[in-house]
Image: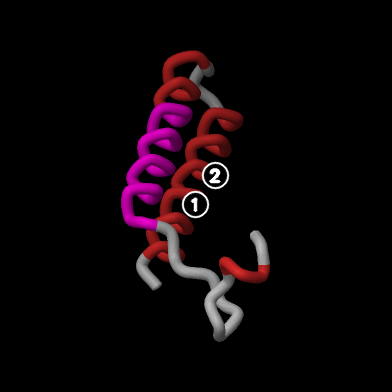
């Protein structure tokens, strides 16, 4: 980003809320694919727990 485009206080503006929905939608798609393609077991559980963690993190950071 060019110095001319930055706000005077040096902070960046937050992303639009539509980015949150896109990120959550893609995360849900990846989780669905993991559910469908991976066999039941510990590895699938770990993958789904990680996806849930990332989903919570997206929601928490975008609500600031």
Q: Relative to 4, is 64 on the left or the right?
A: left
24 or 54: nearer the eye?
24
Instruction: Indicate the position of residue 6 as horizontal and vertical percent values.
Output: 58, 71
Which region shows up in magenta?
16-31
Magenta portion: prevailing SS class: helix
Quadrant showing the C terminus: bottom left
Residue in the image at 53% along x and 70% along y: 12
Residue in the image at 39% along x and 48% along y: 19
Q: CA distance from mark 2 to mark 1?
A: 5 Å
42 or 24: nearer the eye?
24
Instruction: Identify residue for label 2.
Output: 50
Q: Residue furthest bottom?
A: 9
Instruction: Indicate the position of residue 47 as horizontal and vertical percent values.
Output: 55, 35
Asked if the stretch drawn in magenta spans residue 21, the answer is: yes
Vertical comparison of 28 with 59: above or below: above
Q: Are marks 2 and 1 in contact (CB under 8 Å)?
A: yes
Instruction: Identify residue for label 1.
Output: 53
Q: Kindly indicate the quadrant of the structure image that contains residue 62.
A: bottom left
């Amino acid at each position: 980003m060019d110095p001319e485009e930055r706000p005077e206080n040096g902070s960046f503006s937050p992303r639009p809320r539509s980015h949150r929905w896109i990120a959550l939608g893609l995360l849900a798609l990846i989780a669905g694919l993991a559910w469908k393609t991976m066999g039941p077991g510990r590895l699938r559980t770990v993958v789904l727990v990680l996806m849930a963690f990332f989903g919570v993190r997206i929601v928490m950071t975008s609500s600031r």
